[in-house]
Image (tube, rainbow, N blue to C red):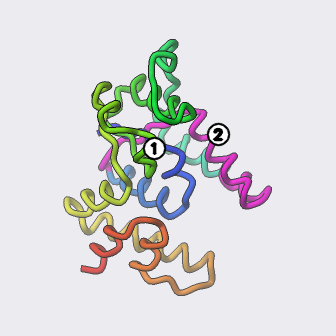
Amino acid sequence: MKAVLDTCVIYPTVMREMLLGAAKLGHFTPVWSARILEEWARAARKLGPEGEAQARAETALAQANWPAAQHPAAPGVEQRLWLPDAADVHVLATAVASSADVIVTVNAKDFPRNILAEEGLERRDPDGLLYEFWLSDPAGIARIAATVLTEANRLSGGQWSQRGLMKKARLPRLGKALMK
């Protein structure tokens, strides 16, 4: 399965690490555009200059790990597409141009299922998608989650629980499953 990762699922660290960890395990092939990655870096400016620098470094790492993931929209594709938020059309155009199967996003209202279906695409939320991966590979997804938890605790100096971290990362269903 080829999945376009919208900026809103790449920007949050825990969500991104869980999704890219699942991609490393072979659960899906990630797809993005230069514009999606640039949006990630710009969003990280909210954290200060070091936030943007960190995002650009992580962008370079993601590009090195998945050199075939970046797809530009085909000429003319973006002009023929429509979404409720015109600023998201580039994500749909990337999905169409790359022959992706799904768009992974938390912005359900901006990616109506009927419009995506016309292009042969599905919209998936990251929590539901990761939960499905957990159902088919509980040990693999649990390893990724344990690594993410360890790093979150190291960086924050805190004592996150697995479920608490996943809930804060907007992955509550996955967090609950990991506790089984």
**For the point 57% across and 38% down, which residue is it?**
36
Distance from the alpha carbon under mark 2 to that under mark 1 = 13 Å
Q: Position of residue 141 (x, y in %)?
A: 32, 64
The magenta segment is 26-55
Which amino acid, mark 2?
Answer: Glu
149 within the magenta span? no
Q: Nearer the viewer, residue 7 or 86?
A: 86
Say what secondary structure mark 1 lies in: strand
Circle 1: is it few (<14), some (14-19), or many (20+) Cα within 10 Å?
A: many
Q: Quadrant of residue 1?
A: top left
Q: Is residue 177 left or right of residue 65?
A: left
Mark 2 lies on residue: 38
Mark 1 lies on residue: 5
**Furthest residue to the right?**
49
**For the point 51% across and 16% down, which residue is it?**
79
Circle 2: is it few (<14), some (14-19), or many (20+) Cα within 10 Å?
A: some
Which amino acid, mark 1?
Answer: Leu
